[in-house]
Image (cartoon, helix red, strand yellow):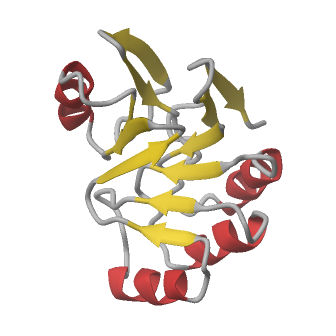
């Protein structure tokens, strides 16, 4: 499966829309938090095929959580998980958190094949034991480059994509 991983959107609609166009063939999309505004949920849902599942966790910059939940409920492909998610793709456990200080021990635990996080806006990946630790970077553009990442569950290869 091809998983598209993104984080720290922070309402950057032009970058989000560009990223979503590149994610059209994703088997699933994982968002590691900091959507910010409720309208971002609608943009994500409408920018992808209806059949593409989207899994979203909270970051530390979610605006109106009640309205984010209401918007998500209008789209069958949007799945909100709260602060943390454990998902299964191709028989592999995948964890989502927003925070690097939580992600690193999860990746070292031996319980996951992939652990994704955001928060620090820095694209990063490494291999810890048998787990890939992945920060897809940011869509905001605070630190310069705007990126998301692909993770292939078969090959376990990470590929970063810069959005210009």
Residue in the picture at 46% in, 21% down: 124
- Give the quadrant of the C terminus: top right
Q: Is residue 49 left or right of residue 126?
A: right
Does residue 10 appear to the left or right of 116 in the view shown? right
Q: Is residue 26 above or below residue 52?
A: above
Placement of the N terminus among the 4 image quadrants: top right
Image label count: 0
Which quadrant of the structure image shows residue 129? top left
User: Is residue 95 something that shows in the picture?
Assistant: yes
Q: Residue 90, relative to residue 76: is it above or below?
A: above
In the rendered structure, the answer to whether residue 3 lies left or right of residue 128 reads right
| Quadrant housing residue 99 | top left
Residue at the image position 62 percent from the left and 24 percent from the top: 154
Q: Nearer the viewer, residue 132 or 100?
A: 132
Q: Position of residue 112 (x, y in %)?
A: 32, 30
Q: Nearer the viewer, residue 40 or 79?
A: 79
Q: Position of residue 114 (x, y in %)?
A: 41, 30
As displayed, is residue 101 above or below residue 24?
above
What's the residue at 51%, 34% (across, down)? 137
Displayed quadrant of residue 147: top right
Q: Residue furthest front?
A: 91
Q: Give the image location of residue 108, x and y in percent.
A: 21, 19
Residue 145 seen in render? no
Residue found at x 37% / y 59%: 57
């Amino acid at each position: 499966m091809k998983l598209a991983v993104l984080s720290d959107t922070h309402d950057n609609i032009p970058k989000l829309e560009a990223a979503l166009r590149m994610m059209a063939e994703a088997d699933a999309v994982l968002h590691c938090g900091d959507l910010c505004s409720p309208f971002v949920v609608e943009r994500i849902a409408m920018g992808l095929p209806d059949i593409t599942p989207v899994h979203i966790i909270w970051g530390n910059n979610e605006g109106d959580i009640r309205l984010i939940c209401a918007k998500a409920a209008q789209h069958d492909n949007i799945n909100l998980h709260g602060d943390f998610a454990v998902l299964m793709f191709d028989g592999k456990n995948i964890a989502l958190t927003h925070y690097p200080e939580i992600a690193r021990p999860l990746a070292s635990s031996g319980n996951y094949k992939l652990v994704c996080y955001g928060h620090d806006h820095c694209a990063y990946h490494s291999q810890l034991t048998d787990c890939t630790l992945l920060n897809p970077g940011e869509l905001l553009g605070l630190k310069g480059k705007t990126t998301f990442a692909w993770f292939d569950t078969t090959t376990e290869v990470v590929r970063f994509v810069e959005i210009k």
